Amino acid sequence: MRRTLVLLIAAALIATLRPAAQAQVSKVRVGFSARTISAGAAPFAVATKMGWFKNDGIEVTVVPLAGSQASVQNVASGELPFALADVPALAAARTQGLRAKIYYSAYQGNITRLAVPADSSIQKVSDLRGKTIGVISMGSGVLFAKAAVASAGLDPEKDIKIVVAGEGAQTAAMVRSRQVDALSQFDTQYAMVENAGIKLRMLDAGEIDHYPGNGFVALEETIRTRRKEAAAVARGYAKGTIFAMNNPEAAIRILYEVFPQARPTGKDEVTAIRDDIKVLQARIANWRLENAGVPRWGESSEARCAQYLDFLRKWGVIKEKLGVHDVVTNELIDEINNFDPNRVAAEAQAYRFK
């Protein structure tokens, strides 16, 4: 009788505690500035697979969006608490009154570049006069293209034409059929275009090529009231970044497991993994901390951000002067970096996909 009573009490306690434990995990939706999930999303997949998000009390859902402007708009409307977006999109919204900041610089190099087919007669940005530039969407790559051509002495409203070229194979088809003369897209997309058989050549757009890329954007109020979640999202992403840099193949295999839609169709597994490692390597080049000369994951170089904002104002992307602290903050960086990166790297190197 006593044993039965003890078992009943224990069962009641477990039933009482289980909902409380489940309630500790917050579901968080994070914007990703591309219409499709590709190798660039590997850090999210790895952090999910390794349990890093869950250990920090969150469950992350990645939401594909049509570029940085769409990501900023979703944060502004409150639809999403966090999103990966670039500085031009955030700065433009900030001049319109949006009180949001990048609190984690994910890409320390500028992932968006101008590119042309390898055999194109176009050799420099000023040669784009009268040419058609293809972007992924009208919310991705447009501001970069306009700033780049303006800095080369062209009128972005009159001297070029910007059209939507889509992503990956769709972009490759438009380049192949000469519907576009150049592209203003980002690193992983260019790798996918080359995987589709189009060799590309990057144009030197000067200083803008060396400015920072996307970071996690959130409203100032969100950073203040959901600080723990904000740090957890970025910390998991940082760990996933380190893992992917140290074991790209495992990261791609994990990507396919967590995001099955990311697995390429029409390719055998060996070819798919080989091609997606190439895509991932393109992004890895822009994750490296040495690109910005910062020591901590996600830290924003205030000097480089200030230069970027001055550049954007000089060439008409934004109409008002912004201070660096209007756009970025490093206030969460200590919390985000509360882990051992060497341990994560070692874990990645020893990881064998099962």
Image (cartoon, rainbow, N blue to C red):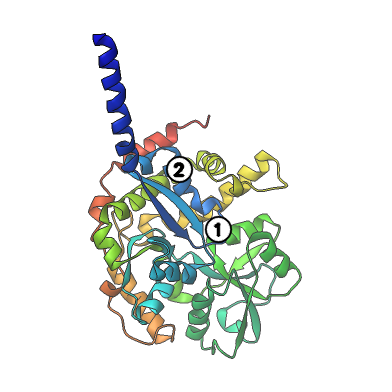
Tell me the CA gap for discs 1 and 2.
18 Å
Depth check: give the residue in front, 108 or 323: 323
SS for callout 1:
helix
Between label 1 and label 2, give the one nearer the viewer: 2
Q: What residue is at 67 percent from the left and 66 percent from the top?
A: 171
**Residue 331, how many percent across, how many down?**
23, 61
Q: Is residue 107 left or right of residue 224?
A: right
Badge 1: how crowded within 10 Å, few (<14), some, or many (20+)?
many
Secondary structure of the residue carrying tag 2 is: helix
- In the rendered image, is residue 138 in sight? yes
Amino acid type, mark 1? Thr
Quarter in which the N terminus is drawn: top left
Which amino acid is tagged 2?
Answer: Val
Residue drawn at (51%, 54%) of the image: 40
Which of 285 and 16 lies nearest the eye of the viewer?
16
In the rendered view, would you say 222 is above or below 161? above
Mark 1 lies on residue? 188
Report crowding for label 2: few under 14, some 14 to 19, many 20 or more residues within 10 A (C-alpha).
Answer: many
Task: Please indicate, yes or no, whether residue 108 appears anywhere in the rendered image.
Answer: no
- Side of 256 where 59 appears, left or right: left
Which numbered marker is on residue 120? none
Q: Position of residue 14 (x, y in %)?
A: 31, 27
Q: Position of residue 142 (x, y in %)?
A: 53, 76
* Label 1 vs 2, first from the N-terminus: 2
Task: Indicate the quadrant where residue 138 lies.
Answer: bottom right
Position of 65 relative to 159 (above/below):
above
Disc assigned to residue 46: 2
- Residue ID at (28%, 67%): 220
> Residue 303: percent from the left, percent from the top?
29, 71
